[in-house]
Image (cartoon, rainbow, N blue to C red):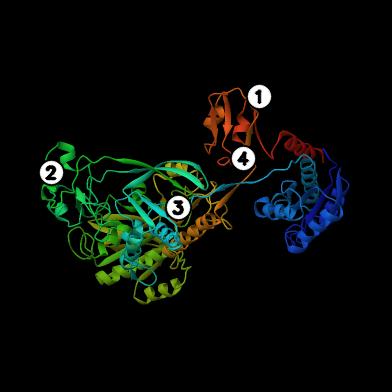
Amino acid sequence: MPDVRIGVYVCHCGSNIADKVDCAGVAEFAGGLPKVTIARDYQYMCADPGQDLIRKDIKDHKLNRVVVASCSPRMHEPTFRKTLESAGLNAYFFEMANIREHVSWVTEGREQATEKAKALVAAAVARVFYHEPLYERFADMNKRTLVVGGGIAGIEAALKIAASGNQVVIVEKEPSIGGNMAKLDKTFPTLDCSACILTPKMVAAAQDENITLYTYAEVEKVEGYVGNFQVTIRKKARSVDMDKCTGCGICYNKCPAKVPNEFDEGLGMRKAIYVPFPQAVPNKPVIDRQNCTYFQKGKCGVCSKVCPTGAVDYAQEDQLVTEDFGAIIVSTGFETLDPTLGPQWGYGRYDNVITALQFERLVNASGPTQGKVVLKDGTVPKRVAVLHCVGSRDLNFREYCSRFCCMSSLKLAHLAKEKTGGEVYSFYIDMRAFGKGYEEFYNRVMEEGIHFIRGKGTEVIQRAGELFVRTEDTLLGKYREVPVDLVVLNVATVPRADAEKVAQTFGIQRSPDGFFLEAHVKLEPLKTATDGVFIAGGCQGPKDIPDSVSQGAGAAAEALSLIEAGKVKISPVVASVDEARCGGCKACLALCPYGAVDFDDEKKVAVVNEAVCKGCGTCAASCASGAMGVRHFTDEQILAQIGEVLAV
């Protein structure tokens, strides 16, 4: 090994580090470590003057290794690697010691923090001695993008990418795009008709020559890597020939079979052959084989007999298609908590206790009651209660805030007042009117005469056929029972039931609340652990329509940044196999979370697909023969690092 000359730089990070760590003392200590040519402390190493200092020292002192002791490598390791490259050094001759998150932010005493910082710096110096040059590679980028989920976030992402002239495929599980937004009547704070602002985007997506819609379809398998994904899509049999169908509606008007309508949240009925809602895109029917008399009993066939174009095709089968994509945007949306999990809310036990989405369908002109709010007996309620945070901010159900719940509850209260003219009670914990125009909307609803009760609706009971909402009114300082005719539960936003399956298919991690996990909550909210796979909308966490639209556009920008570059960078920090030591046990194949390890049947050894590998080390840690290793995390490097931490 040539003469190793190491430069060490200790960052003050303003006062973030310097308040707890004697940075000058750490730099002085580092100057006495083996192979350290120069050691300095500086106020802000990540700033241009700090980087210039490193570049100048590399030239003047002929440094060939650099250690920076500052904040999280996740934030600034790329910054300093570029600094080394600009000075003519290989980027991987760099090591970072985290003395902010690992020291100053978590250590009480200044002396203790300084000693800990010295230990981490010594460990970094020992490790960087064994660093080897690594080189990034590039792969060609397929310019097609897959959008999974056709809600408002997915539609927005697809439209933005299509506008750039690139091809997009939307895969939607339901027979129509539109997602949860399609079920809403009005949107806050402007009270725009939801369909009026959503339908033009749905139609635009269907008519755009750069967008292909696969509705009533699901992604079955994803292989490959960023820039070169191979995706298998199952196009489920609609039992209707889309090319022949004109959408005339005769088939479902004549169909004798009726089942509860899931789009109307079970409040209305639909036919066994149906279009989900009047503005559906595509506006062509699908046969529900589970409830179709022909498929269950071999009888009926009315829809086929009355179809004027012969579009009904009972023999139609699922189709599997495999297509190539460069980037993937996952926007699969959210569901709402099942309120029967909390018997105290009375849902499913008492008539006239409904969810917020059910209320949305009641007040909608295309809903089961053509927009009339009525009780089970057909009368108009005179007293309506809207309960906020049902299952949200609750350690027994969902600890997190559902975020748009306050504003949607205000909207529901406004609609209840408008539709019934009765007394409306809003039970809330805190009012979180955080967005543009939201506080003004809150004030407007208060002026409409809504009764606001600051206290969570803890229980719904029934006495003598009358409903009562129990609460602790924290403003009055007493318990209350409020008699009402109708209770609307604004239940928590939760991950979809198939979230785990989707996460495994696309290589996405999940946060403790079950939603999809972003690469960095602040700096990379749309990226995931799998390069080239982005998330947008309600699948990442509760969010309202403006935020979902923004994330859809943001995810499109992320995908386009890869597409327009034409090539994708592949990290060299990946697993590698020593074929002479590999025993061919195949344990690593099953353990790899990214499916990056294959098996060479001729050589009888494991093979790593470096484009897919993320260098997580699972294979290396589990390899019984020691044949698996990870570049940039060799045994020499790690053992040297550990040894110095323990020695100081």
Q: Which of the labelled discs sits on residue 580, or is there none? A: 1
Q: Is residue 108 left or right of residue 34?
A: left
- Mark nearer the N terminus (1 vs 4): 1
Note whether residue 454 is visible. Answer: no
- Mark nearer the N terminus (3 vs 1): 3
Q: Which residue is mark 3?
A: 145
Image vertical order of residue 304 relative to residue 247, above or below:
above
Q: Which residue is mark 2?
A: 301
Image vertical order of residue 580 relative to residue 493, above or below:
above
Q: Which residue is mark 4?
A: 615
User: How far is mark 3 from mark 4, CA to CA?
Assistant: 25 Å
Are discs 1 and 2 less than 8 Å apart at CB? no
Image vertical order of residue 173 relative to residue 355, above or below:
above
Q: Amino acid at mark 2?
A: Gly
Q: Is residue 557 left or right of residue 572?
A: left
User: How far is mark 3 from mark 1, CA to CA?
Assistant: 40 Å
- Mark nearer the N terminus (2 vs 3): 3
Mark 2: secondary structure: loop
